[in-house]
Image: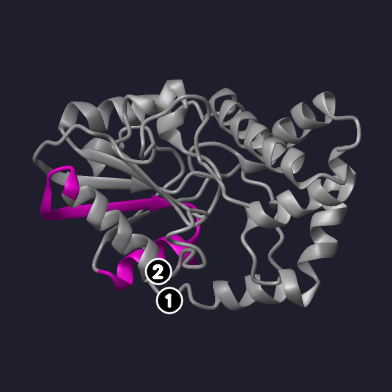
Amino acid sequence: AQVFLFCGQQAANPSLRTRTRRAAVVVSFDLDDTLWPVVPVVEEANQQIAKAHEELAAEEVFAAMRRLRRQPAWENSSYGDVRCAAYTELLGDKTAAEAVLQQWICARNEAGAIHLYSDVIPCLEGLASSGAMVGAITNGLSNPIEIPKLSEFFDFCVSAEEETIFPHRKPSPVIFEEAFVRARNLGWTDGAWWHVGDDLAIDVAAASRLGLRTVYVDRPERVENRFSLTSAEKLAARQAEADSEPDLTVSSLRGLADKIQ
């Protein structure tokens, strides 16, 4: 399925602002469990779909997704494609399933706004005041440019679910390099870059290998993502790649602009 990371009538590239400006510093954020807790966000999106489509009870959709992921043909498919295939299986209609997937993406964005951590907006306001360029680098299906509470603060978003990037998910350098391209197109001139995320392997270590400075967000309230389709073996292998210490470790994003000066 072709996945569009936006809702409604949007510009040709909803993951990139049209404004350009010189910025000495770029700050890129992971999204899930960095700006909002992923479990309640996905739960809420699932519930919205289940209310609108009685055939798509959340438990049945996730069971179908896990079953598909175990099949060799789907082992390396994108999350969006697996979710769309599960909808197709349960609805018996691929076109309808693709429409539902877009509805789910919109519901996920809306839920992200509802469940934002309380320190996120003050952090982004501080970065805006400092003149930093702000972006998102995510393996998921959310786009902060499409979230009204966040859109004014973000200059670009890069998702591993985009057709031109998949299968290069974090920690692949490819997704970060695409972020560099988008930032340069907006006026960044290869100055300082900080990447902020909650994963020591795919955020901290991956960004460090490319010469970025890193902020590890270690939130005490974080819970395991029970909606992940990644196997325990792959998770363990990924964490083994957490071979870099972050430049800064925080439990809250409040005051980040001052801490990275």
Binning the other alpha carbons within 10 Å of mark 2 as few (below 14), some (14 to 19) or many (20 upward) gives many
In this orientation, does residue 227 appear? no
Q: Is residue 94 left or right of residue 157?
A: right
Which of these two is toward me, 146 or 230? Answer: 146
Which image quadrant for residue 252? top left
Q: Work out whether 111 lies above or below 66.
A: above
Amino acid at circle 1? Asp
Q: Mark 1 or 2 closer to N-term?
A: 2
For the C terminus, the quadrant is top left
Is residue 205 on the magenta stretch? yes
* Residue ID for mark 2: 205
Which image quadrant for residue 221? top right
Q: Residue at x 60, y 78 (%)?
A: 237
Is residue 193 on the magenta stretch? yes
- Residue 243, labelled with which disc? 1
Q: Residue at x 48, y 53 (%)?
A: 162
Which image quadrant for residue 210? bottom left
In this orientation, does residue 234 appear? yes
Q: Are marks 1 and 2 in contact (CB under 8 Å)?
A: yes
Across and down, in percent, residue 50 comes to 83, 31
Across and down, in percent, residue 216 comes to 41, 54
**SS at badge 2:** helix
Q: Is residue 196 left or right of residue 141?
A: left
Q: Work out whether 194 lies above or below 93.
A: below
Which of these two is toward me, 93 or 143? Answer: 93
* Region rendered in magenta: 185-210
Amino acid at circle 2? Ala
Q: Residue at x 26, y 62 (%)?
A: 212
Q: Is residue 163 left or right of residue 213?
A: right
Across and down, in percent, residue 198 comes to 49, 52
**SS at badge 1:** loop
